[in-house]
Image (spheres, coloured by chain):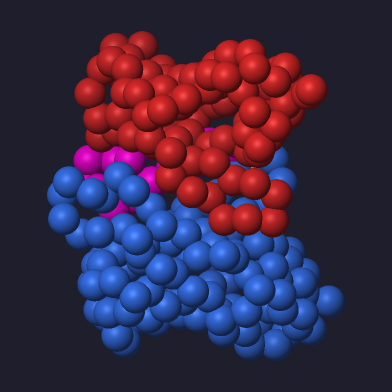
Chain colours: A red, B blue
Amino acid sequence: GQSLEQPSEVTAVEGAIVQINCTYQTSGFYGLSWYQQHDGGAPTFLSYNALDGLEETGRFSSFLSRSDSYGYLLLQELQMKDSASYFCAALNTGGFKTIFGAGTRLFVKA
Amino acid sequence: DVKVTQSSRYLVKRTGEKVFLECVQDMDHENMFWYRQDPGLGLRLIYFSYDVKMKEKGDIPEGYSVSREKKERFSLILESASTNQTSMYLCAVTSGTSGRRDTQYFGPGTRLTVL
């Protein structure tokens, strides 16, 4: 079957660094995306990795290792507004279908 | 940026009613998707469409159908609503060009309650 595993909850302190891991098991894997969703809002795109390695976008970075079927989202200099749910999502080779993980709820404390 | 709108933010229907959820995009994107989101389960794909009049089943199509008569509009239909279809429904759009299929643009969602 196809599935993505990520922790259900993570708690961190304002100003800290947090890493949200994602392992995947999918057929025809093409790339890994990350989305952020605040309560009551729609998911918004954060980053995408098609190749192994690190992609950096401001305070957020995303990493992919195809050989380990593993990726992570790294959030630096945490702010209270980063409290949200974060989803990893695997794009298949056809490019049409994306499988989402169940989401990680991040709580940022003062 | 792509703008995706959904016909209602909140909807309350009764068991057995036929329900239409509509999604409209303002860009000329080929691919449109319907997901439902439930606590602890993430987003699950119901149906998607990669062109007008084309549709493909996702992971949980039972109890749903879709219609795409125009490129900008993708409708989700619940033929006979049931209480287990109470959920948040999200529409998403991606570009058909190979370089940008990775980014899904979501609508605001419709929270459907079936009584």
A6 horizontally vs A32: left or right: right
Foreground residue, A15 or A42? A15
Give the total of numbered labels.
Answer: 0
* Image quarter of residue A106: top right
Position in image of residue B97 (x %, y %): 16, 55
Q: Residue at x 70, y 87 (%)?
A: B17
Position in image of residue A2 (x %, y %): 43, 35
Foreground residue, B48 or B108? B108
Position in image of residue A73 (x %, y %): 48, 23
Q: Residue at x 41, y 68 (%)?
A: B3
In the rendered view of the protein, which quadrant contains the C terminus of chain B? bottom right
Q: Is residue B81 visible?
A: yes
Position in image of residue A3 (x %, y %): 48, 33
Is A42 above or below relative to A94? below
Taking the magenta stretch, the answer to whether it contains residue A98 is yes
Is A102 above or below relative to B58? above
Q: Residue at x 24, y 67 (%)?
A: B30
In the rendered view of the protein, which quadrant contains the N terminus of chain B? bottom left
* Image quarter of residue A99: top left
Identify the magenta region: A89-103
Q: Residue at x 53, y 75 (%)?
A: B6
